[in-house]
Amino acid sequence: MSLSYPLSLASSGTTLVPSSVSTTTRTGKPISDSETFTYPREYNFPPFFTLQRISSTSHAQSQKWSSLIQSYCRFHRLFKLSLIDAVSSPLFHNARINKRLELNDAREMVEFMRKEGRAEWIGSGKGDERRNTAWIWWRNPEEWANAIAEWVEETGQKNTVLTLYELTESDITVSQEFHGMDPEVLQKALSTLVKRGKAQVFGQEDQQGVKFF
Amino acid sequence: MSRKGVGLAAFDRSRITSAQYASHGNNLRSSHSTSIATQLSVFRSLLQQFAQTHAKDIRSNPSFRAEFARMCAAIGVDPLASSSGAGGKDGGGSFWAQMLGGSVNDFYFELAVRVVEVCGATREENGGFIGVKEVKDRIMSTRMEGGAEITDDDILRAVNTLKPLGSSYSTLIVGHKTYIRSIPKELNTDQSAVLEAAQLLGYVSVSMLILNLRWPRARAKTAIDDLVSESMLWVDKQSDEWEYWSPGFMLEVDNGNAG
């Protein structure tokens, strides 16, 4: 379950050596508070915070932002990113070198991620209002679905009924990466499993259960 | 020693002498060649022995490796070039490839693959122009713990092994730094001067060039714009005057802020 993500991450950054050794040991477990997020080297590079206008440079920059945003959200277990709040957070504001990514530029980066399938705008309205909040798919619903299905398989829980609460909040999944995940993302993930005929969801709003096949 | 002969017999005599000279010459030649062959085989086996016993050192100890490479160069042997020669395919590569195959050659070839990977992965951000030190740091940072250490010298040798492929990889010195260029592109003197200036602080600005190089504004602007359009400089607009940063500086800034 842990392999698919690090590989896809690797394609956006340095691609030298499978970094799965260090990455896989970290997946699964929710990261403890004592660890601090390690920013990539470009985070301290002043022009990183100015949108580059030359297409190849800009592409390299967007890929670096995409990978930074994904790993930042993954580390802090953020599923939704509000750009208006985020522009004053350390993600988009490097206080040490006093550079920040402007809201509009942050939008462009997330838009780049949307095209990559790593983000999805949430929101209605016109123009930029629509582009204030986004799902950040450091794992997309499909990948979450696979992780859950794999866990169900491994623990031999096919054909048993689990409540959604059990799936994400109880002790039995505490070692899994999907433990504590956003309920809306969980719904999306489960619905892809339902579409594939691998699960069935039933029950009411807060009393939902799921059965895996 | 020979008397000047008169008459027909002299012809015979001279034929005999020259035949004797010839056969003696042949003897000398063949004895020479056998002794040289012996020397060569002794030398070969010794060098092989040396390479084998020290294979580990050659791979793991950068200064030892550099010394070995220098020794080979001093006795007129290039372990890298000779291995790429058209050696007997049936015998599993050339003489040197067989001899050093497990150690020196493979080391540099593997390294060359890494260099190509780094250059490819960073081409968009630096326009195919990257410092040897950055390449080395990137390769080192992705190596496993306890992996063999590599030096700038190793990187340069590895780049040289790419030559027979007819690839566009070459090295180039600007200022006090050596760069690897992975796409064929010439720098004009103004562009080199700008890159050299950017080595000092990591960035340049138009007014810095006007002040320090005494260039007219248009010249400074053109040189910078050219480099920007080649991805060799990144612009930072969040300062009083726009600053143009060398992408190679991404690593160095990072070093100052571990944590």
Image: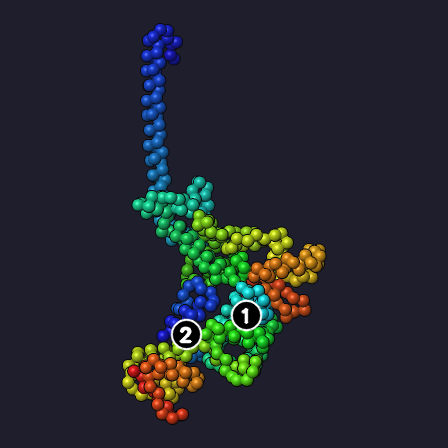
Q: Is residue B240 above or below residue A193?
A: above
Q: Is residue B207 left or right of B41 when viewed as pictured?
A: right
Q: Position of residue B142 (x, y in %)?
A: 44, 63
Q: Mark 2 points at which residue?
A: A26
Q: Is residue A152 left or right of A45 when viewed as pictured?
A: left
Chain letter behind tag 1: A
The kind of secondary structure element at disc 2 is: helix
Residue drawn where x is 46% and y is 45% of the image: B70
Q: How crowded is mark 1: few (under 14 residues within 10 Å), some or many (20 or more)?
A: many
Viewport quadrant of the N terminus of chain A: bottom left
Report the residue that reaches farthest toward the top: B7
Residue drawn where x is 63% and y is 59% of the image: B224
Q: Where is residue A18 in the image (x, y as percent from the top left)?
A: 40, 65
The residue mark sitting in front, 2 or 1, is 1
Q: Earlier in the sequence, mark 2 or mark 1?
A: 2
Tell me whether marks 2 and 1 sit on the same chain. yes
Report the residue that reaches farthest toward the front: A126
Real-space Cα separation, disc 2 to disc 1, in angstroms: 22 Å
Q: Which of B67 and A42 is in front in this view?
A: A42
Q: Which amino acid does label 2 sit on?
A: Arg
Q: Nearer the viewer, residue A164 or B110?
A: A164
Q: Name the residue under label 1.
A: A43
The kind of secondary structure element at disc 1 is: helix
Q: In which quarter of the image is residue A152?
A: bottom left
Q: What residue type is labelled 1?
A: Tyr
Q: Position of residue A81 (x, y in %)?
A: 51, 80
Q: How crowded is mark 2: few (under 14 residues within 10 Å), some or many (20 or more)?
A: some
Q: Is residue B14 left or right of A111 when viewed as pictured?
A: left
Q: In this view, does A63 lie above or below B69?
A: below
Q: Residue B129 carries which label?
A: none
Chain letter behind tag 2: A
Q: In this view, does A123 lie above or below B230?
A: below
